């Protein structure tokens, strides 16, 4: 199933490849109803982006770990899904339920072994961010090398729910709609938990005032470990969701990381709702550029918007001004 195309023409218009994530294919439906095509396909693509960014939002916003290996973690989960699907035929949706808790455990272990020593010696938040960037930059190449060794450099994919369905005259692959539903469930559920539960209050307190949180009995180190592990689990959910419809290779992790980082900065660091809105917004913008102007300019449009946010609102579109 290496580099296997989608099974029918309706789906090929939106989900054929291989190609980088976030470069929508030209869609013949746009000639009939360009506005509706941009809105629907943009929201579906934006759901993917938002899902990919949730984990990095938690890791950086609460644990203050800038994880440059985040994209590779999504790829590990994606390759695990492909391997399990080919070996056992286990449906991807079932695999997600198994991969997510396993990824949480891996994230917990990784923080304990690798990140906790960095936190202990950092002293200041700024030094921790620099050290985490350097450490995870090295981790990126370790994971990428292992993926290349085990799975090779070819593009791969799985065939799952490839049939298209009509939504307001626009054909969309069912697997992309499933990914959108997973994003809505994960993002909405996480936002509610962080806002309405005691655990969420503890997480927010540790993120906003890490120096004062211990005064009220909050174990900041434990909270950071939980946040990093949760972020890893969300990365795995994002990776397995993308694997259901997107062709990918072992070297695509940097694309996932950069897209997630752009959304985190645009939405405001640690702002789950902001990440969701920024993800959907970015999907709409890229789909508009790909449909109306040129698909080759989508990355340019993304980073032009990113630079504009950094220059004029560095705290993010939904962050609070200092």
Image: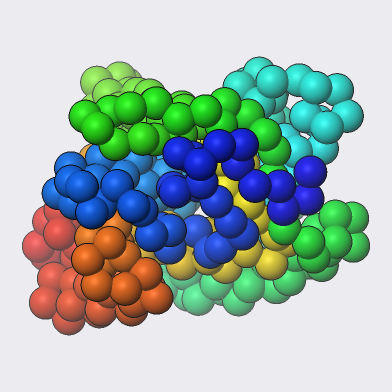
Write the residue at 19% across / 51% down. 34
Q: Quadrant of the N terminus?
A: top right
Q: Nearer the viewer, residue 228 or 148?
A: 148
In this view, 217 is above or below 134 = above
In the rendered image, residue 210, in percent from the top left (x then y), is placed at: 35, 50
Viewed as shown, does residue 134 lie left or right of 259? right
Residue 114 seen in render: no
The image shows residue 226, relative to residue 212, as above or below, that is: above
Query: Percent from the top left, x then y, of residue 167?
Result: 28, 28
Residue at 9 percent across and 62 percent down: it is: 321
**Residue at x 23%, y 60% (from the top left corner):** 288
Q: Is residue 179 left or right of residue 292?
A: right
- Classify residue 44 as left or right of residue 136: left
Image location (x, y in percent) of residue 162: 56, 31
265 left or right of 99? left
Quadrant of the image containing the C terminus:
bottom left
The residue closer to the viewer here, 86 or 16, is 16
Image position, residue 278 (x, y; %): 25, 52
How many numbered badges does the structure rendering display?
A: 0
- Quarter of the image where one finds residue 158: top right
What residue is rendered at 61% in x and 59% in y? 18
Q: Can you say whether 223 is above or below 305 in the image?
A: above
């Amino acid at each position: 199933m290496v580099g296997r195309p989608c099974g029918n023409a309706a789906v090929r218009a939106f989900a054929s490849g291989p190609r980088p994530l976030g470069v929508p294919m030209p869609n013949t439906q746009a000639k009939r109803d360009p506005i509706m095509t941009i809105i629907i396909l943009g929201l579906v693509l934006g759901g993917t982006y938002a899902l990919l960014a949730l984990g990095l939002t938690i890791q950086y916003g609460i644990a203050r770990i800038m994880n440059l290996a985040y994209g590779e973690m999504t790829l590990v989960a994606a390759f695990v899904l492909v391997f399990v699907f080919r070996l056992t035929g286990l449906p991807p949706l079932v695999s997600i339920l198994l991969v997510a808790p396993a990824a949480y455990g891996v994230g917990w272990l990784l923080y304990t072994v690798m990140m906790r020593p960095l936190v202990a010696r950092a002293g200041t938040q700024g030094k921790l961010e620099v050290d985490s960037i350097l450490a995870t930059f090295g981790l990126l190449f370790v994971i990428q090398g292992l993926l290349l060794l085990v799975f090779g450099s070819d593009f791969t994919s799985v065939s799952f729910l490839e049939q298209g369905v009509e939504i307001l005259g626009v054909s969309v692959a069912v697997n992309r709609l499933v990914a959108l539903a997973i994003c809505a469930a994960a993002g909405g559920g996480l936002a509610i938990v962080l806002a309405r539960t005691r655990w969420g209050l503890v997480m927010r307190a540790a993120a906003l005032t890490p120096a004062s949180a211990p005064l009220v009995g909050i174990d900041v180190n434990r909270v950071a470990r939980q946040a990093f592990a949760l972020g890893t689990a969300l990365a795995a959910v994002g990776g397995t969701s993308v694997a259901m419809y997107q062709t990918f290779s072992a070297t695509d992790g940097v694309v996932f990381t950069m897209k997630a980082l752009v959304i985190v900065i645009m939405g405001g660091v640690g702002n789950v709702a902001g990440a969701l809105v920024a993800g959907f917004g970015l999907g709409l913008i890229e789909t508009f550029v790909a449909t109306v102007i040129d698909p080759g300019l989508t990355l340019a449009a993304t980073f032009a918007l990113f630079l504009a946010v950094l220059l004029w609102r560095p705290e993010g579109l939904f962050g609070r001004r200092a």
